[in-house]
Image (cartoon, rainbow, N blue to C red):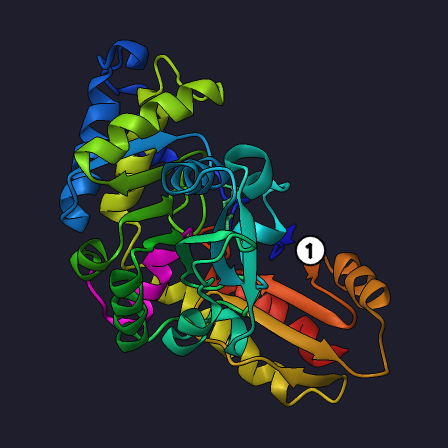
């Protein structure tokens, strides 16, 4: 099967598996797992931030980030397509007791101007605007990337208004690879950053939350109450460290393959519209010839799995286990429909 449903479907290769089995591990609840400590310090250093915390999922690192910044009656400002709002089971409300202000914006990205306009007045009737959360790349925006100038402008608005700035960087490494931006530039402007190791980087499990010493100290306690403190997590951390050290620059291959398929699809008569394809996510809209269900069924008949992403919308995500041969096979099928 060729699986284009998500970049989370990858399995560790031989070298990553070897790194896992040879990891030196200990009880992370005592802070004694050397592989976890190595991963956390490597990532903090990479972003030029004080500390990092290794967690089970990107939902957990986002939700801990939100809890760090928000309390009851506070408000999070984000795009209406944000993963933290759409796909985290109402965690903003149930974990932090916070409200959310949803903004519009081109392919999932918000602007400094829109953030400024969304800040609540100092009035007893209103919630308290407390933080802004950006997503880069933006999943539901088709893997779109932020311009650093806009991020910087949003940071200025946050500074002037005492708002924290969080990044959902589940696919930040794709954005860095596509734009040539540097991790340290992100470390400088964001208060907290969540990055995933189990998406394009190909690790089996894991995400990291980055922040200041004080924030990550508090984050450990929040992780604990979520049941997320763990023991010999070093086996997983070793996979994550391997992924960070070996699988970042190859993301450009995933981007190239997504781009090739995007070009092909834009010339197929059954496709009405192909979204701009900047990274490893490709979204396209079907015309009348196929419905989502019939299209996905036909692909499945050719041993290709994809994902329906709304009415007449199909999403492909390229990844480490989608090879050049797989890409050629997929393109042959797409041409033949
Ligand atoms: C995958 C993803 C997350 C985290 O998801 P988990 O499945 O909990 O690891 C967060 N944000 C975005 C944009 C994602 O794509």
Assess whether residue 120 is covered by the magenta stretch. no
Q: Quadrant of the C terminus?
A: bottom right
Q: Is residue 181 left or right of 128 when viewed as pictured?
A: left
Determine which quarter of the picture holds residue 183.
Answer: bottom left
Assess whether residue 172 is covered by the magenta stretch. yes
In this view of the protein, which residue sits in the foreground, 328 or 305?
A: 305
Q: Residue at x 17, y 48 (%)?
A: 46
In this view of the protein, which residue sits in the foreground, 169 or 295?
A: 169
Residue 60 screen position, x and y as percent: 47, 35
Q: Is residue 138 above or below residue 20?
A: below
In this view of the protein, which residue sits in the foreground, 49 or 91?
A: 91
Query: Circle 1 is placed at which residue position?
Result: 305
Q: Tell me if the residue at label 1 has its CB under 8 Å from ligand 1.
A: no
Magenta span: 169-182
Residue 229 screen position, x and y as percent: 40, 18
Q: Is residue 171 above or below residue 221?
A: below
Q: Residue at x 45, y 73 (%)?
A: 117
Q: Is residue 318 above or below residue 236?
A: below
In the image, farthest residue toward the front: 124
SS of the residue under disc 1: strand
Q: Is residue 9 left or right of 223 when viewed as pictured?
A: right
């Amino acid at each position: 099967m060729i699986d284009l449903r998500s970049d989370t479907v990858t399995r560790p290769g031989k070298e990553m598996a070897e790194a896992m089995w040879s990891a030196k591990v200990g009880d992370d609840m005592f802070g004694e797992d050397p592989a976890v400590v190595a991963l956390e310090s490597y990532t903090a250093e990479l972003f030029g931030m004080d500390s990092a915390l290794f967690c089970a999922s990107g939902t957990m690192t986002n939700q801990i980030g939100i809890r760090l910044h928000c309390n009851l009656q506070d408000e999070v400002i984000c795009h209406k397509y944000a993963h933290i709002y759409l796909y985290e089971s109402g965690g903003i409300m149930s974990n932090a007791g916070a409200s959310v202000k949803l903004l519009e914006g081109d392919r999932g990205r918000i602007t400094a101007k829109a953030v400024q306009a969304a800040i609540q007045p100092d009035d007893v009737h209103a919630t308290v605007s407390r933080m802004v959360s950006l997503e880069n790349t933006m999943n539901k925006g088709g893997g779109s990337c932020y311009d650093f100038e806009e991020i910087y402008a949003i940071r200025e608005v946050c500074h002037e208004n005492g708002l924290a700035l969080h990044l959902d960087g589940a696919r930040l490494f794709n954005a860095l690879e596509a734009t040539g931006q540097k991790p340290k530039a992100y470390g400088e402007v964001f208060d907290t950053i969540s990055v995933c190791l189990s998406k394009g980087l190909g690790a089996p499990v894991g995400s990291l939350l980055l922040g200041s010493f004080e924030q990550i100290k508090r984050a450990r306690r929040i992780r604990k109450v979520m049941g997320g403190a763990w023991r010999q997590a070093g086996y997983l951390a070793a996979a994550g460290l391997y992924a960070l050290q070996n699988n970042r620059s190859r993301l450009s291959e995933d981007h190239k393959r997504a781009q090739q398929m995007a070009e092909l699809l834009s010339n197929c008569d059954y496709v009405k519209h192909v979204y701009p394809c900047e990274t490893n996510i490709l979204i396209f809209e079907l015309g009348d010839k196929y419905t989502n269900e019939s299209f996905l069924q036909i692909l499945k008949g050719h041993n290709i799995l994809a994902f329906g992403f709304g009415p007449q919308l199909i999403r492909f995500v390229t990844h480490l286990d989608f090879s050049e041969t797989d890409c050629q096979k997929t393109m042959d099928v797409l041409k033949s429909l």
